[in-house]
Image (tube, grey):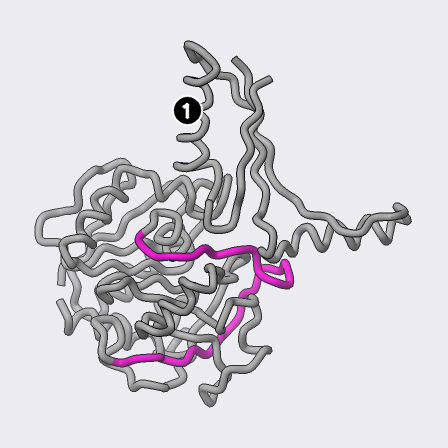
Amino acid sequence: MKARVTVTLKSGVLDPQGKAIEGALKSLGVEGVNSVRQGKVFDIELDAADEAAARAALEKACEKLLANTVIENYKIDLV
Amino acid sequence: MRAAVVVFPGSNRDGDVSRALRQVGAEVVTVWHAQDALPAGTDLAVLPGGFSYGDYLRCGAIAARAPAMDAVRAHAARGGLVLGICNGFQILCESGLLPGVLMRNAQLRFICRRQHLRVERADTAFTRAYAKGQAIDVCIAHGEGNYFADPQTIARLEGDGRVAFRYADASGELTPEANSNGSINAIAGIYSEKLNVLGMMPHPENLIDPLIGGVDGRGLFESLARAA
């Protein structure tokens, strides 16, 4: 099974990297950019009996390691 | 005092902190991250600075899940002393031994310079050799030292007197220039609830010898030697 986990900063958490990217896009002349927030994507291949088991394993992965839930949210997509 | 310095792949300040500990008479043992126990009779566990696991994923995230950290957690639960400096502070936050997180510096720059800290309290195992409100001259060297926690956590830390050090100027005043990484309330170090775990971004172990430019960091290690 394949999954994509997306980890993003919670709203309200300052994202200086996103701000720097936003500034760079503006200076490159990319029009219409209002704001940029950056995050991480994990493409994971795993063996699981079914979708529920895969989700359970990925939840555990996110809670234990992939995301720091003090500042980050995560989203699991099975693909 | 028996100190166990835990070394992870990518730790690089273990030698300096060991030297600082030996200077105050401590017996220092190095513990490899894959070991699941600290040596018997350990009074103080130290997580040194560096770049454990190359700062992959998040600073300290992978080191926080190492077998040696279970031993450090058990040591802390027994009331044992734990000191995390720089990357060690990041590991303590990632391991859940201390609340909050160290984010990328507000100006996105790695900051490496001399920095004064204000000692917030002088009645803990880590700070008895200092005076409350004293400005000590140490060093900072980090790219991710911007302390962040939710407002409830900050209120609890402040209310319980768990802020150990704040970034300050040479007279102990808190100024925006002194808080160069953007930490909430200029927080440079915090204690656990029972005050036996200290995490701090600055490096007291850099300033223990007049030859290197100062000895203000020595007080922390002298305090620990007295406590243990």
Residue B111, image x, y percentages: 56, 64
Residue B55, image x, y percentages: 49, 45
Label 1, secondary structure: give it.
helix
Residue at 28% over, 48% down: B6
Is residue B13 in view from this perspective?
Answer: no
Residue A57 drawn above or below residue B154: above
Q: Chain of mark 1?
A: A
| Magenta span contains residue B108 | yes
Quarter residue A42 falls in: top right
Residue B109, image x, y percentages: 62, 60
| Magenta span contains residue B19 | no
Residue ID for mark 1: A56
Is residue A64 in view from this perspective?
Answer: yes
For the record, the magenta segment spans: B97-122
Say whether residue B101 is left or right of residue A15. left
Which of these two is toward me, B137 or B166?
B166
